[in-house]
Image: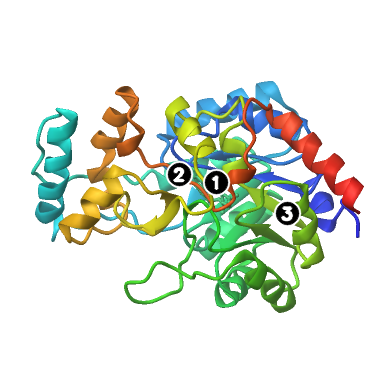
C-alpha cells in the first residue's frame, strides 16, 4: 500500500489528504493555502459566500500558495419555501427572546449566488471544483473539462456514486454517516436524514462500483483512519472536523472549545439549523427547536431563517445557539496544531503503520 496514490497524480498533490470545504467561515484562505503548501489539497468552502467575497478569498489563497486548491459549491435548489415559515418563525422567536434579539415574522429571501460563483471558478482558473448536494448540470461539467478543471463530487450511496461518475466526476468522495456537517445526500426520496451508511461500509462498496478514484470522508481523524481508508480501497481521505481545531481555522473559539470538550456520543443529525440533515454537537438550539415539535422549513429557507440567531450567538460567544457541526471522531481531535503539523503527523504516522 502506498501513500502516493492515483488521487495525488490526478490532483497534482503530494499526499492523499483533502481538507474539506466547510461553508460558513472555518476554511480561511490561510487554512486552504497552508494545507496545499503542506502537500494536501486545501478547499475553500464557498457555498454561502457572496461572489465578490469568494473572488477575494481565491485571490488571497493564490497569494499564499502556487499549489493546487479547490473551491466547494452546493449543487442544489436555492428557491425559498413560503409555507410553514410562520410556524418556524414562532419557534425561532422564542429562541430570539432568550438572546434578546428582535422578533421576525415575515418570510425570508435567500439569494442564489450559484451562477456567479461558478463563473468566478472559471475566470479565476481554480484548479479543482468540489461539489456537494448533487451533481453539476452537464453543460457546466463540459465548461470545466474544457479548461482542465478537475471535479470532485461528494456522495453518500453507491447509487449516487454511479450518477456522479456518469456525470463526469474525476474523483468521488464517499461520505459516511460518521461525517460532520451536512449530509451530501441527493438521491433519497422522502423525509429522511439522508443516506446514513457508515464510512467503513460505504467506502469499499463505492470503490467496487466505480472506476474513478474514491476518497473516504467521515470520522477520519488521524493516521490510523488514513491507512484504514486506503486499506478499504480509497485513494485518499477528505477530513473536515480534524481541521476545525487547527490554528488557521476560522471556527469561533467557543466552537473549537465545544469540539475539544465533546466525545463520540455528543453529536446528532438534525435539520433544525438549515432544513437539510447535518451532524453537529447537540446544544440548546437543537433541543429547544426539537421540543417544539414543529418541522423546520426546507433548505435553504431554514438556513436563512436561523441566520440572525447563529450570528448573534457568535457575537455573544454563546455556543448553545451556534451550529456546532462535527463528526463522530472528536475524542481524537488535537488543538493548537497548525494545518501543516496535522498533515505531517498524519503522514509520519501512516508511514510508521505501513
Ligand atoms: C463544519 C463543517 C462544515 C462542512 N461544510 C461542508 C461544505 O460546505 N461542503 C461540503 O462539501 N462538505 C462540507 N462538510 C462535510 C465534509 O465535506 C466532510 O464530508 C466531513 O467533514 C467528513 O467528516 P469529518 O468531519 O468527520 O472529517 C462540512 C463538514 C464540517 C465539519
Q: Residue 55: x and y, percent?
A: 51, 30
Please give the name of the residue rendered at 34% of the width and 25% of the height, measured from the top-left corner: 317
Task: Note whether ligand 1 is within 8 Å of mark 1.
Answer: yes
Q: Residue under label 2, please give it.
A: 47
> Can you tell which mark lies on residue 225?
3
- The one nearer the camera, 299 or 194, is 194
Please give the name of the residue rendered at 16% of the width and 56% of the height, measured from the top-left corner: 292
Asked whether residue 39 is in view, the answer is no
Asked whether residue 118 is in view, the answer is yes
Q: Is residue 255 left or right of residue 249?
A: left
Q: Residues at badges 2 and 1 in contact (C-beta under 8 Å)?
A: yes
Q: Is residue 346 above or below residue 257?
A: below
Q: Quadrant of the C terminus?
A: bottom right
Q: Is residue 310 left or right of residue 36?
A: left
Q: Residue 261: x and y, percent?
A: 50, 37
Q: Is residue 9 above or below residue 176?
A: above
Residue 14: quadrant of the picture? top right
Q: Quadrant of the N terminus?
A: bottom right
The kind of secondary structure element at disc 3 is: helix
Q: CA distance from mark 3 to mark 2?
A: 27 Å
Q: Is residue 321 above or below residue 56?
A: below
- The one nearer the camera, 224 or 113, is 224
Q: In this rendering, which labeled residue sits more in front, label 3 or label 1?
A: 3
Q: CA distance from mark 2 to mark 1?
A: 6 Å
Q: CA distance from mark 3 to mark 1?
A: 23 Å
Task: Note whether ligand 1 is within 8 Å of mark 2.
Answer: yes
Point out the tag, 2 or 1, that comes first from the N-terminus.
Answer: 2
Q: Residues at badges 3 and 2 in contact (C-beta under 8 Å)?
A: no
Residue 233: quadrant of the picture? bottom right
Q: Residue under label 1, please give it.
A: 72
Amino acid at each position: 500500500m502506498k501513500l502516493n496514490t492515483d488521487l495525488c497524480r490526478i490532483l497534482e498533490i503530494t499526499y492523499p489528504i483533502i481538507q474539506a470545504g466547510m461553508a460558513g467561515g472555518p476554511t480561511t484562505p490561510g487554512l486552504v493555502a497552508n494545507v496545499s503548501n503542506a502537500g494536501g489539497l486545501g478547499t475553500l468552502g464557498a457555498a454561502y459566500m457572496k461572489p465578490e467575497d469568494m473572488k477575494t478569498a481565491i485571490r488571497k489563497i493564490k497569494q499564499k500558495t502556487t499549489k493546487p486548491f479547490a473551491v466547494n459549491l452546493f449543487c442544489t435548489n436555492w428557491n425559498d419555501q413560503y409555507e410553514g415559515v410562520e410556524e418556524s418563525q414562532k419557534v425561532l422567536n422564542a429562541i430570539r427572546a432568550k438572546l434578546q434579539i428582535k422578533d421576525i415574522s415575515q418570510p425570508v429571501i435567500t439569494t442564489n449566488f450559484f451562477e456567479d460563483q461558478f463563473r468566478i471558478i472559471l475566470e479565476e482558473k481554480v484548479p479543482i471544483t468540489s461539489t456537494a448536494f448533487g451533481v453539476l448540470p452537464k453543460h457546466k461539467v463540459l465548461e470545466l473539462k474544457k479548461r482542465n478543471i478537475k471535479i470532485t463530487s461528494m456522495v453518500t450511496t453507491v447509487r449516487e456514486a454511479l450518477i456522479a461518475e456518469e456525470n463526469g466526476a474525476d474523483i468521488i468522495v464517499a461520505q459516511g454517516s460518521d461525517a460532520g456537517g451536512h449530509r451530501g445526500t441527493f438521491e433519497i426520496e422522502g423525509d429522511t436524514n439522508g443516506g446514513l451508511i457508515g464510512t467503513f461500509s460505504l467506502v469499499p462498496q463505492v470503490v467496487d462500483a466505480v472506476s474513478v478514484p474514491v476518497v473516504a470522508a467521515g470520522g477520519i481523524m488521524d493516521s490510523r483512519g488514513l491507512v484504514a481508508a486506503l486499506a478499504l480501497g480509497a485513494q485518499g481521505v477528505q477530513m473536515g472536523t480534524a481541521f476545525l481545531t487547527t490554528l488557521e481555522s476560522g471556527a469561533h473559539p467557543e466552537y473549537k472549545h465545544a469540539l475539544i470538550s465533546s466525545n463520540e456520543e455528543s453529536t446528532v443529525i438534525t435539520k433544525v439549523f438549515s432544513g437539510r440533515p447535518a451532524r453537529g454537537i447537540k446544544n440548546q438550539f437543537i433541543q429547544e427547536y426539537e421540543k417544539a415539535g414543529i418541522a423546520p422549513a426546507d433548505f435553504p429557507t431554514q438556513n436563512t431563517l436561523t441566520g440572525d440567531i447563529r450570528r448573534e450567538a457568535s457575537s455573544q460567544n454563546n455556543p448553545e445557539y451556534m451550529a456546532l457541526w462535527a463528526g463522530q471522531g472528536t475524542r481524537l481531535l488535537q488543538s493548537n496544531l497548525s494545518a501543516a503539523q496535522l498533515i505531517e503527523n498524519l503522514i509520519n504516522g501512516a508511514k510508521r503503520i505501513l
